[in-house]
Image (cartoon, rainbow, N blue to C red):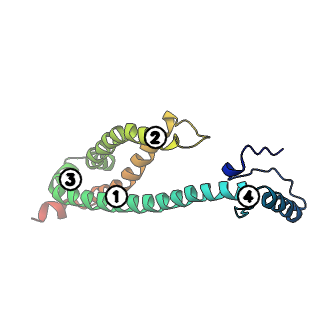
Amino acid sequence: MLIFLDHEQTQDMFVRVTGSNTASTIAGLEKLWKDRIPYRPFEYKFLDDEYDALYRTEQRTAGVFTTFSVIAILLACMGLFAVAAYSVMQRTKEIGIRKVLGANIPSIILLISKDFLLLVIIATVIASPIAWYTSGKWLQDFAYRINIQWWIFIAAGAASLIIAGLTVSVQALKAALMNPVKSLKSE
């Protein structure tokens, strides 16, 4: 069904076609267009191509965000590793004294890691509401959207805790396995 109200206002025509005999259908539509609206050129597009183009931009944006997120996580891990190494170096004598007094490896790892992990927890608590709000605003532009579930933020916080814990525990384990005599002897 095709309804033309005014020849002067006609700009678009939406036609549902089957996948068979597309070329003759387009030729017939072009003839109809030229009969009804001879002063405007006939240009056609397929709606599924238009939708693909819309979502292709979103897919490209997602790829860029993924790439830069991985780079940011790697840089953050390197920075955390450096700060943990500096902290261990500053506390070398303390760790040596604790080991001489009988501290075990897990307690030394916990001693070094707890400050860093507490900062990660605080950062997650601060970042989660901001991420929830901004992702909700971004999703409002889509006709079909999902609701952000609360457990996603807990999973992200747990993942960041695990990554930070692994990063710091490398330095903490190195400090815990160090010979206390060397740490107490060095000045």
Whole-Å distance between the Cαs marked 2 and 3? 48 Å
Look at the numbered disc 3 and give the secondary structure of its residue. helix
Give the total of numbered labels.
4
Whole-Å distance between the Cαs marked 1 and 2? 27 Å
Earlier residue among tags 4 and 1: 4
Which mark is drawn over residue 76?
1
Can you see residue 177? no
Look at the numbered disc 2 and give the secondary structure of its residue. helix
Residue at the disc numbered 2: 137
Which mark is drawn over residue 95?
3
Earlier residue among tags 2 and 3: 3
* 141 horizontally vs 74: left or right: right
Earlier residue among tags 1 and 2: 1
List x then y, in percent, for residue 170: 35, 58
Residue type of the residue flagged with mark 2: Lys
Residue at the disc numbered 4: 46
* 37 horizontally vs 168: left or right: right
Residue type of the residue flagged with mark 4: Phe
Residues at circles 2 and 3 in contact by the CB criterion of under 8 Å: no
Earlier residue among tags 4 and 2: 4
Earlier residue among tags 3 and 4: 4
List x then y, in percent, for residue 153: 45, 39
* 81 horizontally vs 36: left or right: left
Neighbour class for label 3 at 10 Å: few (<14), some, many (≥20)? many
Instruction: Please identify the quarter of the rendering in which residue 157 is found.
Output: top left
**Height in image: 84 above or below 137?**
below
Whole-Å distance between the Cαs marked 3 and 4? 69 Å
List x then y, in percent, for residue 180: 20, 58
Q: Nearer the viewer, residue 135 or 90?
A: 135
For the N terminus, give its image quadrant.
top right
